[in-house]
Image: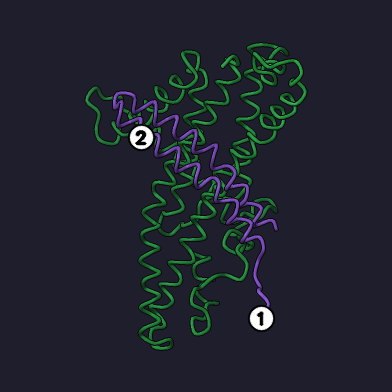
Chain colours: A purple, B green
Amino acid sequence: MEAISGSLALIGYGLAAIGPGIGIGIIAGNAVQAMARQPEAAGMVRTTMFLGIAFTEALALIGFVLFFLA
Amino acid sequence: MEQLILAAEECDLVENSVCAPANVTELFEFRTPIFEILGFPVTRAVVVIFIVAAVVVALLFFGLRKKAVQPGKFQAAMEGLIGFIRDEVAVGIIGPDGIRYFPYLLSLFLFILVANSFEIMPFINFPITSRMAIPLFLALLTYVIFIAAGLRRQGFRYIGDILWPPGVPVGLKPLVGIIEFFSIFFVRPFSLAVRLFANLVAGHVMLSILLVTGLVSFLSIGDIGLLKSAFGIAWWLLGMGIYMFEVIVILLQAYIFTLLSAVYIETSLHPQH
């Protein structure tokens, strides 16, 4: 049987992307729901959504950088 | 362009299915200086930084030169952009006293927007924000500004306020203090810089690899056979789709960097919430 070869960092980045992926999905889904229920609050919801996405995304991006460092 | 040609020359589609450079940093490093000033070599990255600065100045100068009551298209666009940063970001996030930080936020936004948009600009094709020096410097600028704003507004009480939010039980204070200290003084500037950097690096790598693969497989259609080159042209189409997607990324990253800078300044000015 052939040994598996490749970069372990690639797997690490894949694992790092799972959590933020789920998190961003939840944030965007709830933001859409909030905007549909209260269209007049859409501007505020959008700003808060981008903020939440930016904070959640940071984990995936740290994984991305570690992928280059490793 | 330069790196596209480099990648295309080394590409061998007979063995590989995608033209990837052997080392990714080749896409971001320009070792050959274009010219020298007083012994300092000026590479392509430096030239692009100065082009970005010149474009930002030109946008503001020509956009706001006439101040017509009935604005033309360009003036209306610039006024919309500036008004958006002032009303939604500076005053909207920070509050009425945010107007003091509006010039900083506007220049931050315009610089990052123009620098990012060079990613998809034909003949330049290189986002200067994908070199860590630029995002890191901008993030450190925000870092210094938000700490200075807090110290100026509240004196040294600011450090205590920001480390221990109101209502923390005494037993938890050491733990909360350590976590907050780490998150505010290390993770904030780091994640601010890395977010911009990583998005642009990812976009640049994707675009280079996909578009070069498509181009090379179109040019070497005789060597690799019709089926494989059709496969390569599918890569090119995917690359063009991502090209459109990058337009959104460019706008969004400039906006998020400015927005987070405003949020950090706001937490320094009003720490109770």
- Rounded to the nearest angstrom, the CA distance separating label 2 from label 1 is 65 Å
Label 2 neighbourhood size at 10 Å, few (<14), some (14-19), many (20+)? few
Pointer 2 and pointer 1: residues touching (CB < 8 Å)? no
Residue B243 image offset from top left, x and y in percent: 39, 56
Q: Is B226 above or below relative to B178?
A: below
Q: How many marks?
A: 2
Residue at figure coordinates x 40%, y 33% from the top left: B60
Snapshot quadrant of residue A55 = top right
Q: Amino acid at mark 2?
A: Phe
Instruction: Select label 2 or label 1 by which is in front.
Output: 1
Give the residue type that dot 1 points to.
Answer: Glu
Q: Is residue A44 above or below residue B153?
A: below
Residue wearing tag 1: A2
Q: Please give the chain letter of the residue carrying mark 2.
A: B
Using the rendered view, name the quadrant where residue A2 is placed: bottom right
Residue B16: image location, x then y, percent? 52, 79
Query: What is the quadrant of the C terminus of chain B in the image?
Result: top right
Asked whether B23 or B238 is in front, the reply is B238
Which residue does the numbered mark 2 point to in the structure image? B62
